[in-house]
Amino acid sequence: MSEHMKLYEVFIRSRRGLDHKHVGSLHAEDSAQALEYARDVYTRRSEGVSIWVVNSSDIVASQEGDCESFYDPLDDKPYRHATHYQLPDEVNNM
Amino acid sequence: MTTEHTGQHAVPVEERFQARIDAEEKIEPKDWMPEKYRQNLIRQISQHAHSEVIGMQPEGNWITRAPSLHRKCILLAKVQDEGGHGLYLYSAAETLGASREEMNQALHDGRAKYASIFNYPALTWADIGAIGWLVDGAAIVNQVSLQRTSYGPYARGMVRICKEESFHQRQGYHIMMTLARGTEEQKAMAQDSLNRFWWPSLMMFGPHDAESAHSAQSMKWKIKRQSNDELRQKYVDQSVKQAEVIGLTIPDPDLKWNEQRGHYDFGEIDWEEFNRVVGGDGPCNRQRLAHHVKAHEDGQWVRDAITAYEGKKRQRKDRQAA
């Protein structure tokens, strides 16, 4: 069956104000059906107030194996962190 | 009037919208919202985004002249962050249906504003310290409050931005502290910079509450959570101590602790100067805008190349499919 049905990734917003979070995936014929399936499978216990479904094939992902070279330019910059700056105790809550 | 049926009662959507806000719930992109709420948010968020991007100019001006490689790295990282903040904010505005091109055009036409503070020049290295400490400090007071704004994407953007701003303020304060502990000349440079940036920093919070054009409605819709004057007071209260610790003097003879209020009293802002700079006649208004227009126009060939490449790819795909 999965040969004929597309794979969808499902994202759920648990509460207004929060980001949608990835919760899993499912097969469906089209996006409307994917939304209904997602409702049936992933929100049976009021897990969410909003669902996003996205074609899995539309997701472009970085590869963890490439991690070192991909993130290399970011790792040697401790000065991007607030804690890098030593300030007097009286004003250290800045 | 548009109504939505909830159970047996038909509740007007506008009432439901306000009820949601009153209950401290966030409004999300696909929700119904009053057109004026949408417009008000687009105005405020895009203005905020423009401020981040225009703010890169006075600081960018010092990257090549930072006094050490370490300070240069820090300043580069900070200016890079500001560009990122602009992106978060433009994206939040785009969820309301505003396009990047429209927002950019509004800035170039002078219809959209940005924080007036960036119309003041960064004349000395100490100004880079003052911008981080005072200007980012004022921005943080405002942005911490906006983490509770009623529009979800804006609130979430603020959370992300506030996390990064702490580094900005601390590096600025660190520059000021280092200068203040240096030679007499260096200390004088730090004091001079505080003298020039103090009042424009207070102006960043906008007009007094009674004179603020958008305030009342924005508070009702919880786009703004605290008034201009409240936020300004909070900023003054925290800054006094910070200046004291490094031995600098805030240039306001009326500044003094008010035991009764539990706050510092401070002098009146020069509103004539405020209006002049907001109105386009600050020291650098024309230069800032001209630079932004030029950078945008200079980048046209890149956008053209991307479009051409996308077109080619699409053609190739169509040919393969045929």
Image (cartoon, rainbow, N blue to C red):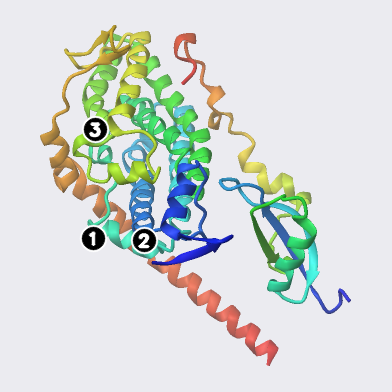
Q: Which mark is residue B271?
A: none
| x, y percent for residue B251 | 20, 17
Amino acid bearing label 1 = Asp
Measured in 3D between alpha carbons, the distance from the residue under mark 3 to the one under mark 1, in whole angstroms, is 23 Å
Measured in 3D between alpha carbons, the distance from the residue under mark 1 to the one under mark 2, in whole angstroms, is 23 Å
Secondary structure, mark 1, is: loop
**Quarter holding the C terminus of chain B?**
bottom right
**Which residue is under mark 2?**
B35
The vertical placement of A37 against B171, above or below, is below
| x, y percent for residue B93 | 43, 55
**Which residue is under mark 3?**
B203
Tell me what residue is drawn at x 17 percent, y 36 percent. Answer: B274
The vertical placement of A6 against B87, above or below, is below
Question: Are discs 1 and 2 both within one chain?
Answer: yes
> Disc 3: which chain?
B
Q: Earlier in the sequence, mark 1 or mark 2?
A: 2
